Image (tube, rainbow, N blue to C red):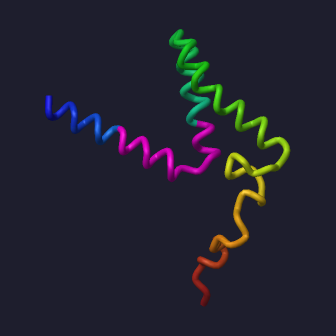
Amino acid sequence: MQEAIVALIVLVAFCAVINRYTPPPLRRWCRSLLAKSARYAGWRWLENRLNLPAQAAASSCADGCGACKGCSPEAIPSNQFFISPNELKLKK
């Protein structure tokens, strides 16, 4: 029983870390892939649950408001520190 509880805690922690640190496009892609798999398996309730937040984010991203934190340049606050990939390259 103790091993099952520890496994559940580790699984929840893993899901929280993945949800926080993966980029939004990758999260949307994974969500759509899981929704397609759920539809194929016949689990309509899971498919509907996975597609619902994605549709809400898509409607808010259409106007460029930045509510989904990743669809427009306005999503990055001006006071946030940002380093571009070009600045990370080693200069000779």
The quarter of the picture where the C terminus appears is bottom right
Residue 55 figure quarter: top right
Give the percent coordinates (x, y) of residue 19. 50, 45
Residue at 68% across / 72% down in the picture? 79
Question: Magenta segment: does it hold 23?
Answer: yes
Give the percent coordinates (x, y) of residue 59. 78, 35
- The secondary structure that most of the magenta stretch takes on is helix
Q: How many marks?
A: 0
Q: Nearer the viewer, residue 38 or 17?
A: 17
Question: Magenta segment: does it hold 57?
Answer: no
Give the percent coordinates (x, y) of residue 44. 57, 12
Residue 15 figure quarter: top left
Residue 80 figure quarter: bottom right
Q: Residue lying furthest top in this view?
A: 42
Q: Nearer the viewer, residue 30 or 76?
A: 76
Q: Residue lying furthest right in this view?
A: 63
Q: Is residue 81 left or right of residue 42?
A: right
The quarter of the picture where the N terminus appears is top left
Residue at 52% across / 12% down in the picture? 43
Magenta segment: 12-29
Q: Is residue 72 above or below residue 29?
A: below
Q: Is residue 33 above or below residue 43?
A: below
Residue at 50% across / 50% down in the picture? 20
